[in-house]
Amino acid sequence: MPETLDADTVTALVVDATAAPSMHNAQPWRFRFFRDSRVFHMRSDLERSMPRADPTTRALHLGCGAALFNLRVAAVHAGWEPATRLLPDPQDPQLLAAVRLDAPVTADGDLAALYPAIHRRHTSREPFTEEEIPAGIRDELCGCAILEGARLVFPSAWHVARLLDLVHDAEGRDALDPAATEDMERWTRIGPDARDAPTDGIPDHAFGPRQYDGKAPVRDFAGRRPVAGRQAATFESTPQLALLGTVNDRRADWLQAGQAMERVLLQATLDGLATSLTSHALEYPELRWAVRDPQSTMGFVHMVLRLGYGPPAPGTPRRPVDEVLELATGLSG
Ligand SMILES: Cc1cc2nc3c(=O)[nH]c(=O)nc-3n(C[C@H](O)[C@H](O)[C@H](O)COP(=O)(O)O)c2cc1C
């Protein structure tokens, strides 16, 4: 094992990290690698935050937590043991995590098994079938969340119906808010904009079809804008949803929840499941509170996941690594 990592290896690790999901594919992260101490710093990029939909930056932390999880998986896959500290410097709130790479890998062998899913996982806004997810797979996914200090719960039928109402409520509120339309326009790429090799945002090929029947809580990123060639389709009538949450609601909890979310998504991908995320109802504090199951011990919900069986989803673009990675000499962390 070499003493440190060459630039190609560091770049490859960051390519893997940045395959993570982020709200509207804004990719609100930056990485710095300190060669001599083999430490990655992951920082938030507040220029890519969403003050209207995400005024607390909770969603930003979730996306960065997912990128951090991918980095850990990729490091183990490459033979390095990651030692992670969340929010290591209280004086520097944009420094979200420090990851020191120790060699060789001694534990966490199960992380490497998730590696093949990093670039196969994509958000699917396609209809899923009505096929039920076996109980064994659900249990395994709940276990993934626990391993990262979070909880995943599959709500009962009445609670799913309530969630769908809350998402509907959020959609109605957005429709009346011009700032929501502005956000959507900033982060979506339609027609020529989508063909022009964008490096962030959601291109129209990832919108999925328009929903004319079914109950899947899938955000329509086209809004009222026409998209050439976009079809309409029937979605599943009994969506299989899961709530991901933590006991507390602090920044470290958000980063943990983001790591748990990605662990669940990667495992689900390996299990042959299609996945999508719905944060809509969580963007309004009064709706977010109602999303929670009052009988559950989950204190705060961070994400609603939709899981099931469906066609493979297309990928979305990522920014070139040289825009998000800085190689530094010297020691840190
Ligand atoms: C915090 C957060 C919130 C998200 N909210 C939604 C959502 O409400 N609806 C949706 O379709 N996708 C949502 N996504 C998924 C992103 O749009 C998706 O990750 C991004 O476009 C990149 O695409 P990919 O997941 O296929 O790599 C969310 C992702 C994150 C991390």
Image: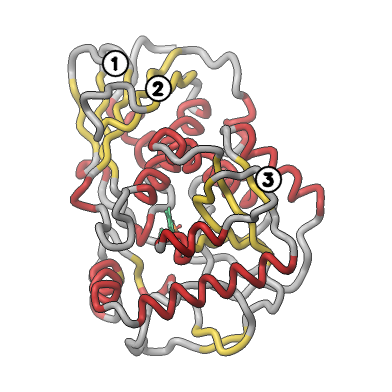
Instruction: Note whether 154 is above or below 329 in the view shown.
Output: below
Among numbered discs 1 and 2, the one appearing first in the sequence:
2
The residue drawn where x is 57% and y is 33% is 148
Q: Say which residue label 1 marks.
A: 333
Q: Earlier in the sequence, mark 1 or mark 3?
A: 3
Going by the numbered disc 3, the residue's amino acid type is Leu
Q: Dot 3 lies on which element?
A: helix
Label at residue 141: 3
- At label 2, counting other C-alpha atoms closer than 10 Å, the crowd grade (few under 14, some 14-19, many 20 or more) is some
Q: Nearer the viewer, residue 217 or 326?
A: 217
Question: Residue 280, image x and y in percent?
Answer: 45, 66
Q: Taking the image as drawn, is residue 72 in sight?
A: yes
**Judging from the image, what secondary structure is the residue with disc 1 in?**
loop
Q: Between marks 1 and 3, how big is the CA–CA gap? A: 33 Å
**Where is residue 56 drawn, in percent x and y?**
32, 49
Give the class, few, some or many, for how many residues have Cα within 10 Å of label 1's Cα (few <14, many ≥20): some
x, y percentage for residue 9? 36, 29
**Camera-side residue of 186 and 57:** 57
Reading the image, the residue beneath label 2 is: 85
Q: Find residue 43 and report its horizontal and vertical position in percent.
A: 27, 35
Badge 3 crowding class, 10 Å Cα cut-off, few under 14, some 14 to 19, many 20 or more, is many
Amino acid type, residue under disc 1 in the picture: Gly
Can residue 195 be seen in this snapshot?
no
For ligand 1, tell me if the residue under mark 1 lies within 8 Å. no
Q: Earlier in the sequence, mark 3 or mark 2?
A: 2
**Toward the viewer: 106 or 161?**
161
| Residue contact at pointers 1 and 2, CB within 8 angstroms | yes
Residue drawn at 73 percent across, 42 percent down? 140
For the residue labelled by badge 2, is the local secondary structure a helix, a strand or a loop?
Answer: strand
